[in-house]
Image: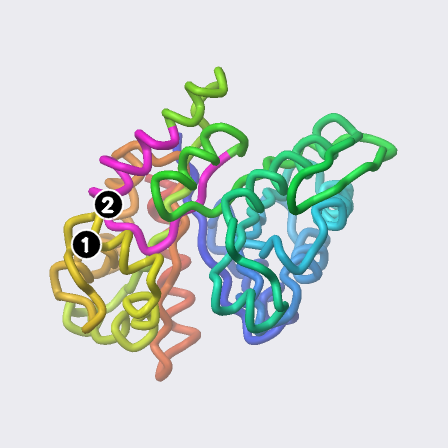
Amino acid sequence: MATFGVAIQGRDAADAVAQIVQAEAAGVEAAWSTIGGAGGDDPLIAFAAALARTRTILVGSAIIQTWPRHPIVIAQQSMGLDAIAPGRFRLGIGPAHVTNMERAYGVDFSAPLTNLREYLTVITSLLHTGEVDFVGTQVTARMRSRGVAAVPVMASALRPRSFEVCGELADGAISWMCPRGYLVEQALPALRRGAERAGRATPPLVAHVPIAVVPSREQARELARTQLGNYSRTPFYQAMFAEAGFGDVSGGYSDALLDDLVISGSEAEVAEGLRALAASGMGEVLAHPILDPDDREGSIARGFAAVASAARD
């Protein structure tokens, strides 16, 4: 059965911890956060505190950016989280996007898939075997740990080649802003191709999708255009939307695209939409509540309730 999780959008680390506690109390199975999802604070710090204050909820990074941290450091942090709450942390990594990485860190973003492949190799080896001896084009890692940790190592994926890399090397692929047809017709087959090439079982696809528990589709579209509009101006996402059959989105999203991307409606309608997405072949559905700036807390509570309802039913 698929798992249903939520994206945590804390103002800071303390708020992120409070939201994870709230999500568990609401009956949500999993909480995820990105590197910027805790008000710019390090989400792994928030996860450590949240794991100590909760009992059952899974937590995961979607994603930790690769370039700023050596893979040995990411593996060591993951081991620490697994020691606090064995079996409840899932690691998601990814190279992020060229503009942010080159501007903030001065990295050479010319080979992001090579970067992802080498990080996956090093982190998986160190976590799952307790040692690594690797020299690549972007990463060198030689280390032996005091033990192993059964932490799934997942990665972000947007275009078919990245889904293939995840199928070959990762314990799962994490999407974002991908239309349903694209996930089913292009992402899943690419994930399978990578797994078949490596002679391994196909890992799960975590479908990260926006949701809006609101009275009307028009309100959902307005919130999405306001809060998610930057992806229509990002080259990687523009190319993916074109491959998905939605043409040139540089001028903004069409209603048809938004209605495909955003699962909206009443709590029951959103829960049913999440279940339908899971039934299309997803291993997990990660719901990202679009927050109404005039009712932030209500948006969070309604989103969590819809996700918990999807899991119950």
Give the structural element (helix, strand or loop) at label 1: helix
Residue 279 in picture, x, y percent from top left: 27, 34
**Residue 177 falls inside the magenta stretch:** yes
Magenta extent: 172-191
Residue 48 in picture, x, y percent from top left: 71, 55
Identified at 45% across, 54% down, the residue is 6
Q: Is residue 263 visible?
A: yes
Q: Residue 251 versus residue 223: which sits nearer the camera?
A: 251
The label shown at residue 180 is: 2
Identified at 77% across, 41% down, the residue is 83
Q: Main secondary structure of the magenta part?
A: helix
The residue beneath circle 1 is: 260
Against 7, is 230 above or below? Answer: below
Kind of residue at badge 1:
Asp
Q: Earlier in the sequence, mark 2 or mark 1?
A: 2
Against 81, is 184 above or below? Answer: above
Q: Are marks 2 and 1 in contact (CB under 8 Å)?
A: yes
Residue 184 in picture, x, y percent from top left: 25, 36
Q: Is residue 57 visible?
A: no
Q: CA distance from mark 2 to mark 1?
A: 7 Å
Image quadrant where one finds the C terminus = top left
Q: Residues within 10 Å of mark 1 (few under 14, many from 20)?
A: some
Res 177 → quadrant? bottom left
Question: Total label count?
Answer: 2
